[in-house]
Image: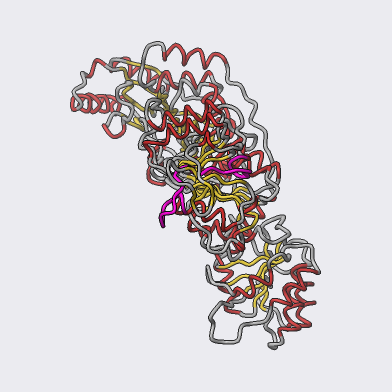
Amino acid sequence: MTGKIDLRPLLAPQSIAVIGASERQGAPGRRLLECLQKIGFAGRIAPIHPSNETVLGLKCYRSPQEVPWAIDAVAFCIDGAGVPAALQAAAEKGARAGVIFGGMGSRAGDVTSPRGRITAIAERHGMALCGPNCMGVFSPASKSSLYLQVMLDPAPVLGDVGLVTHSGSVAIGMLGDCRRFGFSHVISSGDEAVVTSADYIDYLIDDSATRVIAAFIESVRDMPRFTAALDRASQAGKPVVILKIGRSTHAREAAVGHTGAVAGDGRVFSALLARHHAIEVTSLEEMTEILAACQSKRRPRGSRIGVVTASGGQVEMILDEVNPTLFSLPPLPADAAAEVSKTIGPISGPGNPLDSWGNGDYTKNLPAGLDCLANQPAIDAVVLVSDTNDGQPMTPTRYTDILQAASERSDKPFYFMNTRFGLMRMETVTKFKGTGVGMLTGLRQGLGAIGRLGRWAQRRQRPALDLQPPTAARTTLAAALRQGRKIISEVDAKRVLREAGIDVVPEQIVRTLPDAIRAAAGLGYPVVLKVVSDDIPHRSEHGLIAVGLRSEVELEAAWSRLDHSLAGLGVAAGSVDRLVQPMVSGGLEVLIGIGRDPETGPYIAFGAGGVLVELLGEVEVRPLPLCEGDAQQMVTRSRLARLLAGYRGRPASDIRALVQAIERIAAFAYAERERVREIDVNPVIVRQAGQGCVVVDALIVPP
C-alpha cells in the first residue's frame, strides 16, 4: 500500500465487529469478546454470526451490513477460506481496519491466491490490515483489543512500551511479565500482507502513551520506510530497541569474491541499525533490561556508570563484567575518594564500583557513597547493587528508602540492580514504580542496558558522503557490461578503479613467454605472473598465480607451471591471457569489498586482505551510501587498526590514503548499484604514511 496508513482504527478503535463470534469455550471469537469485556472497552461491539441471536449477552448480527453503526475494526475469527469474502463485505460496509489471525497459506506476490486477494481488497479500500498469521493487536492505552488472549488481570498491563513483533509467541511471552513495565500497544504483526513493522513504528512515534518502542523482527518488508521510521523515532527522542532474528539464514550469497563470505552473518543489518540509531539487542533478556531501564523518569545522558555495593566481592564481579564497547566505570577522583573515606573508611581499588560496607552501618555509608558518585561530573547514572528476591528466607535488605532519597537529591538516573538476571522483590519493584529509580537485574544485562541507553542518548545525525565518481569510470564499466560478461576480471576491473581515482599496480598483458620476459624486464624484477580470465576468478586455489619471480629463469619455470595447471583444468594454455606485474611488497594487505544484502541492499566491507581474509574473517561493514566519517571508523575500529597505526616498530601506514580509497570505491559502487552486485578488491597494499596505497587485484560482478 502506498502512502501513510491510518492506524487509529486498528489501535484505538471506537467500534469493533467480530466475524465468527461464538459462545463455544476456547473459540477465538469467544476469547476476543471476553477480552474486550474484561478490559472495559468503551466502544461498540458487534458480534457477527449467521444464526446466533446473541453472543455473551451481546446482540448478534448476521453480516457486517446489518450492523446499524459505522465499524472501525473487524476481527476475522473464521477459517481462511472464508476470509476474502468476509473482508470484502466488511470493506463495503466501510470498516477501516481488520485483523486476520489465521495463515492464508501462500506467499506474497501471488495476486490470485487468498493472500493476494485479501491484500488487494485491503489496499483498494484503504484498510489497515494486521496479519495474516498473527495474534492481533492489544492496546491497553485505548482499552481496546483485537488480540486472541484473554487478560486475567488487565491492571498491570498498561505502560509506556510499544511492542511490535513478528512472533505471536514473543508477544505472549512479553505480556507474561509486566512486573517492571507495561505496554501502550502490543502488536503481533504476523505475515504483514498490508501493514508492516515500519508502519507500526511510525504510528508509535506519534503516540503520546508510548515512550519507548520494542521490535522483534524476522525480516523487513519495506527497508526505506523502516529506516525512515527509525530516523524519525531518533529525532523524536524515542528509543527503538530491536531484536533481529534469522541473522545467519540471511547470510549473503558469496558470488565469486570474498566479500559475501566474510560479511554474511548479520553484520550489515547491525551496521544499518546503528546508522539509524536503533538500539540492537541479541536476546530477549537484553531487550527486557533496556525496557526496564527506560522506566526511570530520568535517562542516562551517557554510558559512564557509577556503582555502589556493600561487598568487596561484588566489586570484583562487576569489574569483570566491564564491556568498554557498552559502558565504562570511571575511577573515583582522588579528592572525592578522600572525602567519602571519612565516612566509609579506606577506599580500595579504583573507587568505582564503591564498596560502601565500611563498618557495617549502611544508614551512614550508603547515602555517602551514593551522593559521592552522583556528584561526579564524569558519571551519567548511579546504580546500587543488592540482591533481594521474593521468597528469600532471610530478612531482606532495607536499602530502598536510602536509594530513593539519594535519587531525589540528584538530577541523574538511579537504578536498583540484582546481580542475577530475572530475580527481584516485588515489594521493591512496587516501591520504585513512578519514582526516579529503575529496577534492573543481572550484572551483564543491567549494566549493558544502561550503557546502551546512554550511548543512544549521545546519538547524532551524520550527512551522507557527498562524493561523485568520475564519469570515465562509469563509462568503462558500461562498455564492459555491454559485452554480456558474467564477471569482469582483473584487467578491466582495475581499469575501472583507476578511472575512479584509485591507484592500481602497473601491469602488462601478455600471451607468449617472450612477451612476458620483455614485460618483466621493462617493469623490473621481482614480478608476479597471473592467468587472466573471466571464467577463472579464483586463481590461487588452481595454482594460476606465481609471485616473487626474481629472474628470467624463475619466470620461465613459473610459465611452465601455469601451463600445467591450465591443462589440469582442461584449458588450452594459449587460449588465455596472462598478466605481468611488479611485485609490491613492504605494505599491509587489506580487503575492500562491495556486496549486496537481500534486505539492506549494497554494503562495503573492510578487513585483512590477501590470504588472511578467510583466516581472520573479521571485517567492518557499512551500508551504502557511506556517511561522513564512516570510512575512518571502519579503519580505526577494525582488528587491523593497531597494525595500521604502527605496531612493535612497524612504521605507520597511510591511513589517509586508505580512507580515501574506501570512500571512492563506495561512491562508485553506490552510483552503479543497479549494475554492480559485487566488487572484490583484494589485496590492496597500504604503504607507509605518505606513500599511498595500491590495488593489486580486483574483480567486478554484475547482477
**Quadrant housing the C terminus:** top left
Q: Quadrant of residue 449?
A: bottom right
Quick check: 202 above or below 58?
above
Instruction: Tell me if I can see residue 479 in this picture.
Output: yes
Q: Where is residue 208 shown, x and y percent of the image?
A: 70, 48
**Quadrant housing the N terminus:** top right
**Residues rendered magenta in the picture:** 9-30
For the residue pair 322 and 51, the one nearer the viewer reads as: 51
Q: Give me the residue at 41% from left, 22% from top.
A: 702
Q: Give me the residue at 37% from left, 35% from top.
A: 253
Q: Magenta stretch containing residue 27, yes or no? A: yes
* Farthest-out residue, front: 53
- Horizontally, residue 573 falls left or right of residue 487, namely left
Quick check: 458 above or below 692?
below
Q: Give me the residue at 52% from left, 44% from top.
A: 270
For the residue pair 433 and 259, the one nearer the viewer reads as: 433
Q: Magenta stretch containing residue 57, yes or no? A: no
Q: Give me the residue at 71% from left, 64% from top.
A: 434
Instruction: Tell me if I can see residue 687 in this picture.
Output: no
Q: Where is residue 627 shown, x and y percent of the image?
A: 62, 34
Q: Where is residue 528 shown, x and y percent of the image?
A: 36, 28
Quick check: 330 above or below 524?
below
For the residue pair 49 and 211, the one nearer the viewer reads as: 49
Q: Quadrant of residue 440?
A: bottom right
